[in-house]
Amino acid sequence: MGGDSKYLGLWYVTPYILGFALFTAFPFVTSFYLSFTDYDLLSTPEWVGLENYEKLFTRDRTFSKSLSVTLTYVALTVPLKLAFALFIAVVLNYRLRGIGLFRTAYYVPSILGGSVAIAVLWRYIFAQEGLVNMIITGLGGEPVNWFGDPGNALFTITLLRCWQFGSAMVIFLAALQSVDKTLYEAASIDGAGPWQIFRNITLPLITPVIFFNLIMQTVQAFQEFNGPYIITQGGPLKSTYLLPLYIYDEAFKSFDMGYASAIAWVLFVIIMALTLVAFWSSKKWVYYAGDKRS
Amino acid sequence: MTKRILSLALATTALAGTANAADLRMSWWGGDSRHEATQAALTACGEKHGHTIQPEFTGWSGHFEKVATQIAGGTEADIMQINWPWLPIFSQNGDGFADLSQMSDIIDLSQWSEDQIVSGTVNGALNGLPVSTTGRLFVFNTTTWADAGLDLPQTWDDLIAAGPVFAETLGEEYYPMEAIGLDAAMIVTLYGTQKTGKPLIDAQTNEVNWTVEEMTDAISFYQTLVDNHVILPWRDQLASGVQALHENPKWTNGEIAGTYQWDSTYFKISDPLGEGEEIEYVGLLELDGQQTPGVYRKASMVFSISKNSDNPEAAAEVLNCLLNEPEGVEAMGSARGVPASQAALSLLQDADAIAPEQADAQSKVMAAEGPAIHPFMEHPDVRSAMEDNLEAFAYGQIDAAQAADEILYGIEDVLADNFDS
């Protein structure tokens, strides 16, 4: 290695650093500044100090509603999605015939991701005369108003996110396959049943992956936009009006980019706080290899 | 010989430069019929003037935000289809778009009346040329109404009487009308205007004209329509999510048999109808003792040129071709309604290219009377004040008086923010 080689790594990461600086760091810092301004997109920002934040916490009923909807959505989505992803991963961890095909098939919804087409598909599936209601009425039930009833709309949007469980599932699957098989054999010899084995061996050993998925899914859920924007546009009665939709409307419909930036920063602080709480709590329930407790 | 070829090549290159061959972009919203017609017109105009024009088109939903983002970033298309109420939003002082009056050597402005030119002018600058004039009219599915054994309504009383007949003869799933969101706000606005003779927002004073009692009355009338099986309840129409009317199966199969729509959307709402389903514009329903027919008429849209365009002259050539010259006008047809430009109107009339139904609807809009419309009637925050509170009312969260109070407060707030008192 010559003397210049110490800079080689830096050269390799330069494209990333440039991209990060331009498309993440710069907007991040700028939005913080804009959150203290009155900025209508078309003219120069005007400094207003804490006015945006003051309005947000004291006078804005839409923000309170949107925040409440967002927290409910995250509280519903993340556990449901993680539980479902883990369940499917456990099933796909068995050595079954054609298991590769199943693993691929279950991952497909995640490849399609939060695309517009999937949101439109969801709208048709849960429409008044859609597939789900056809099944319900076929079984003798009454059709459900999935999107028009404020009590159902958020749940229906939640299911869309849960359906895209593939990425979390693949990570769980990898973790399950890395669990030492001799532990299972030893437990079986000692007379442990499948549930005991899962609860006392599998679960503790994959807690680092559960923790990782928990953080990633929480962050993603707080940023959900496509589904509610395309299917319900936040309605009815703002029952699916997640904070990212509110930020979008304030920025691009009401031309209040300063206020939208303030909301975005409050959202960031909430995500950051919850992440820190998760990290703090992880000391009590996440077990790493080599951990003195293991 | 080589020298001659070289000089000929250089001359050709130079000539191409003086012909202003430019790469342009044009953006618009609309339905499939408009997309196809506009692309054909751009091809024709591009060939005529030696420019290439990249089309950028979307549906109505989200187009405002797209244009707003592009304008904020200075990346908007050279030629833009702009909704008339957006002019004061994007160009408060008249400097948000190119001043087309400075391009009168390229664009034949004599094809528009003075009133039309004024409607596209902000603070003395001609920011947009009206493409057509539009207004809201009642349009009904003649097939469904005939199946119900009814003539198309001429008055509100006719419409209200039709609700129970629809339910009885055709089934509970059939309704004479729909009106949620903006359409609900438009119905409330129409009724209040007819009853009081006053527009909701005064175009001269920039102030709200209605009292809380007048607004409460208009909202209560909306509920009368729901109670009489005239309008599909808000909750039920949202059962399949938020859908444009022309994409709603209940509209295309005739279960929803009427709407209060822009006359310029004729093809958009008639094209997707199922086989055997036909529609007819009937004008404005009459209110017993009305002060005015209350037509909601405005420039339907304008074509503007970006102030940031690198090729404003080339853009002006294309704009003139689309609005005044045979190549553009004939290809575009009446996809944006009956043209405002006299040259385009004559060309299409001579070519028999305006559908009789569309011409009929336009004549109804132009013949009806009503107070001047304030551009802020379609301001996003005014719309939000009306639609959010009407929705809360429709879902039984607030009563008509509370909704009226909230709506008027919301509109006054927007006006206070944007106009000097």
Image (spheres, coloured by chain):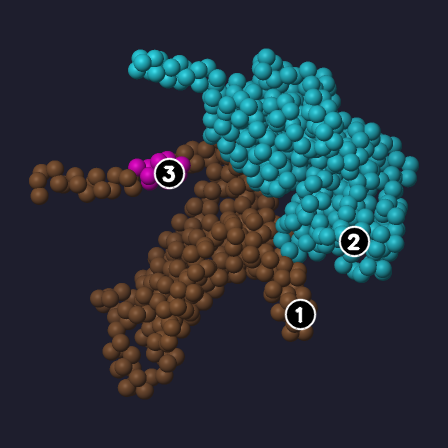
Chain colours: A brown, B cyan
Q: CA distance from mark 3 to mark 1?
A: 49 Å
| Stretch in magenta | A18-28
Q: Residue at x 47, y 38 (%)?
A: A261
Q: Position of residue A16 (x, y in %)?
A: 29, 41
What amino acid is found at the position of numbered circle 3 in the picture?
Answer: Phe
The label number, if any, that marks residue B161 in the structure image:
none
Image quarter of residue B96: top right
Q: Which residue is mark 2?
A: B175
Viewer-proximal residue, A251 or A276?
A251
In the rendered structure, does residue A19 fall within the stretch colored magenta? yes
Q: Residue at x 75, y 36 (%)?
A: B355
Q: Main secondary structure of the magenta part?
A: helix
Q: Which residue is mark 1?
A: A137
Q: Residue at x 67, y 25 (%)?
A: B130
Q: Which residue is mark 3?
A: A23
User: Tag 1 or tag 3, which sits nearer the N-term?
Assistant: 3
Instruction: Determine the chain carrying the residue at label 2.
Output: B
Q: In which quadrant of the rendered image does the N terminus of chain B lie?
A: top left
Q: CA distance from mark 2 to mark 3?
A: 51 Å
Q: Position of residue B421 (x, y in %)?
A: 68, 23
Instruction: Judge depth for marks 3 and 1 and give the one in front.
Output: 1
What amino acid is found at the position of numbered circle 1 in the picture?
Answer: Thr
